[in-house]
Amino acid sequence: MKKLFLLFSVIVSQTLFAQSGEMIFFPLIGNPNFAAAYMVRAKNPGKKVLLIFHDYWGLNDSIKLEAEKFAAEMPDVTVYVLDFYDGNIATDTFNANKFMSNLTEERGMQIINGIIGYAGTEKHFATLGSGIPGAYWSQQSAVRLGKSAKACVMYYDFPESNPPIKYYVALESKRNILKRHHCKTMGISKNPEYRDAHAIILKFLKANLK
């Protein structure tokens, strides 16, 4: 009975957060093509924007659900999950490696510049990336944004892992990667000290994305 209740709770949770976002397409700077992102509009629109960078597997349903959660918990923030694999989603390591290797530095920066232009001027940004290549592009986008970036998070895997993966906040020296841009940074990785990475990241974003 307990297992049935837990299963029902998961289904209800996913139903509550799912499908409030939409896929959008935006032009690239210096490239005639377009790029895509999953966008969850702010319920109370303002200047705050969260850019999420997918992990090794691509822009799949798990990261869309994560975006929905952040948007629901920060109603004044517009959330974008950038698609760096051009519509491809990997279900095995062979294709994940293939899609990731096809992403060049130039293409990645074109996508970042494109979404900055799409989001609009005078915005306050936070960046959040999971695993490879997400953590790398979270850092690169924060550097590109300069003082417009208010927070940068780099972490590995999602909190919903089974069994749960535990996390920790990185040492202060690691947080200061973007210090010259006055941007608060936080690294998250496996460690038995913390269980709920989502709650830790949410608190960090609310404190710094202003």
Image (spheres, rainbow, N blue to C red):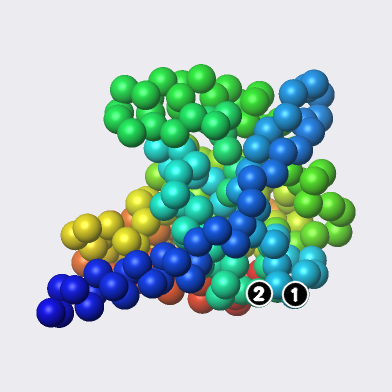
> How many residues crowd around disc 1 within 10 Å: few (fewer than 14), some, or many (20 or more)?
few
The residue labelled by disc 2 is: 75
User: What is the quadrant of the C terminus in the image?
Assistant: bottom right
* Residue 131 visible here: yes
114 and 154: which is toward the camera: 114
Determine whether, in the image, residue 41 is placed left or right of residue 174: right
Residue 27 position, x and y percent, is 79, 33
Q: Where is the N terminus found, in terms of image quarters?
A: bottom left
Q: Which residue type carries mark 2? A: Pro
Q: Indicate which disc, 1 or 2, sits on the residue closer to the N terminus.
A: 1
Residue furthest out toward the right: 121
Left or right of 165? Residue 65 is right
Please identify the quarter of the rendering in which residue 44 is found: bottom right
Q: Residues within 10 Å of mark 2 (few under 14, many from 20)?
A: some
Q: Give the residue type at disc 1.
A: Asn
Q: Residue at x 30, y 28 (%)?
A: 93
Q: Position of residue 37 (x, y in %)?
A: 63, 43
Q: Residue 120, which numbered label?
A: none
Residue in the foreground of this view, choosing between 9 and 46: 9
The quarter of the picture where residue 72 lies is bottom right
The spot of residue 62 in percent (x, y) is: 41, 52
Figure check: 106 above or below 116: above
- Secondary structure under badge 1? loop
Q: What residue is drawn where x is 65% and y is 38%? A: 36
Mark 1–mark 2 Cα distance, whole angstroms, equals 6 Å
In the rendered image, which quarter is residue 40 located in? Answer: bottom right
- Is 46 situated left or right of 188 in this image? right
Disc 1 designates what residue?
A: 44
Q: Are marks 1 and 2 in contact (CB under 8 Å)?
A: yes
